[in-house]
Amino acid sequence: MIKGKAVSGGIAVGPAAVWRQRAPLADQRKLAEAEVEQEVARVEAAVAAARSELTAMREETAHRLGEQAAAIVDAHLMMLDDPALVGEAVERVRRERLAAPGLLAQVGEEVAQVLDTLEDPYLRERAADVRDVTGRLLRHLTHSGGLESVAAGSVLVADDLPPSELLRLPAGHLAGIVLSGGGTTSHTAILTRSMGIPAIMGAGEAIHQIPAGATLAMDADAGTVLINPDADLLAEYRERMAAQARERAELAQLRQLPAETQDGTRVLLAANIGSAPEAEAAREAGAEGVGLFRTEFLFLERQEPPSEEEQYKVYKAALEAMAPHSVLIRTLDIGGDKPLPFLGVPAEENPFLGWRGVRLCQGFPELFRTQLRAILRAAAHGRAQMMVPMVATRSEILWVREQLDLAREELKVAGTPFGTELQFGIMVETPAAAVMADELAPLVDFFSIGTNDLTQYTMAVDRLNAKVAGLYDHLHPAVLRLVKLVVEGAHRHGRWVGMCGELAGVPLATPVLLGLGLDELSMSAPRLARVKKAVRSLDMAKARSLAEAALQLADGEAVRTFLAKQ
Amino acid sequence: MAEFQVTLPVALHARPAALLASAAGKSGATVKVGLNGRFVEAKSLLSVLSLGASAGSTVTIQVEGERAEAVAEEIATLIRNLA
């Protein structure tokens, strides 16, 4: 069994297709039996690609330069079929069991050299043609490195998989992906999630032991891969795969339907994203907006802060991708736990209770206003909203509004156009803000409840501390009662309330959240379908009474049990 | 097997070689062309080119297969018409 990080969930069963993106010319590794034919298939694919390319070129050449010139391309085309070149290379792949590129290069050079030695100068020129065709084949061979020849239904096993390669495959082609490297937040990881391909990454060197063609059973939720499991185990995996496929089909149908309760109440279901390209996937998943656009990625892992222009382009892209829906951009939410080299934030004893979010921004007003200006400018291109994290008290909100006014002034002076309809809100994640929601509501257009941090602060628990993590429960009535306070405070002043914490994506909690009066739920895209299903099966009167009852229970366990019974 | 010799009216460079290779490939027979005892598959353009047969040289054509005689006739005609 091989273990790795579960990057994109699901069960997958299929033959292992071992893949190397760029086989180095000097690849001396002997191929396994099963790999040899795969290698031959790669050569054939390269020949086909070269043929299309040359055929198109022939047409063009004939038009521009006439038949005689086109005849040269004809000769190249014939060389593709010449047994002395490709045929010989393929024979050597089968005989010597080495990778094709090196052998093809060798054969090409041998043939060219024979022509080099001939008397006739015209014939010697043909050596150049041979080298040309060989080069063309090699480019196709090492570039389109074989993903096209990977059989449908295979589990791809590789060290790495560039997003551009993955994107070339038709949807549903691969059963699964297992990589030795790669992180859960890499672009490839994100793609596997949006494409719905079960994927495990970071499996390490162990994957090199997987024989090509071996039957792999992947549990991409658990992060495990079994090699050649026995018949019983295999049957079990296949059954689970079928069940998942049925569920996916059911959920896919939901995409077309509105997020409406039985009695016709509409709820806004939105997506949380951490980069502009994810807006596309969010849309695909049926999101009717972005309820949280995390902007930290723009600031992390670099030596200087992102410019106003750079930020503006990113926010604009997200807004355009989601039009006509809204995008809620959260200003920089960072602190002592993720240091930014250009800020020089000192390490802290308690980073989660420390200098972070809006507090940190108050120490760097220039940086903050640059982000605000970028957001204001982007707001001209769509329905933009912005919110500030970690607010604990009124003065912080007033400071932000002041900065917003200053930012608008700065843009006016520079003659730069900006949006005038930007909605302004705050994240409610500190108990102080939750309890004072009634007082804070008049200062904003909306609230968005960040239940992750709100739960940590309310239960006084560090989620990452194994000793106490069990106390963290966002379904604890303490948290739910605070949610109720926030919603009441906001609605009393005619403001709307959304939720962007994990709780928003928990279908079990949907009746309670709607019953408490939330106007919007924002979650990671894959969760949308299940939550929509929950919304559509609710009746608001029932939801309200469920919510009231849940708030009277003793703890999260009780709430869960109660909700599960409904 | 059918075999004959022919004097080349032109050198077996790109176009003539291509015509020969094409005809050999389409014939369905196994066609070999040899110069000074060295024989190569006629359907392989590159192999034919590698012979370096110049104008006036004498090459040997060997044809094996069902229609050997007929194919040999066709190839002979083709070469004569290269001029």
Image (spheres, coloured by chain):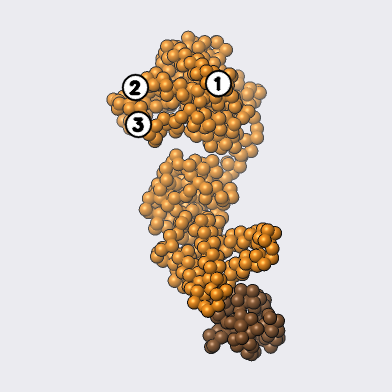
Chain colours: A orange, B brown
Question: Mark 3 and mark 1: span between their CA atoms?
Answer: 32 Å
Residues at badges 3 and 1 in contact (C-beta under 8 Å)?
no
The image shows residue A131, relative to residue B34, as above or below, that is: above
- In this rendering, the answer to whether A86 lies above or below A220 is below
Residue ID for mark 2: A354
Q: Residues within 10 Å of mark 1 (few under 14, many from 20)?
A: few
Q: Position of residue A454 (x, y in %)?
A: 42, 22
Foreground: disc 2 or disc 1: 1
Quarter occupied by residue A244: top right
Query: Is A161 or B7 nearer to us in this picture?
Result: B7
Closer to viewer: mark 3 or mark 2: 3
Identify the amino acid type marked 1. Gly
What is the chain letter for disc 3?
Answer: A
- A162 and A204: which is toward the camera: A162
Q: Are the residues under marks 3 and 1 on the same chain?
A: yes
Tell me if label 2 and label 1 are in contact, CB under 8 Å: no
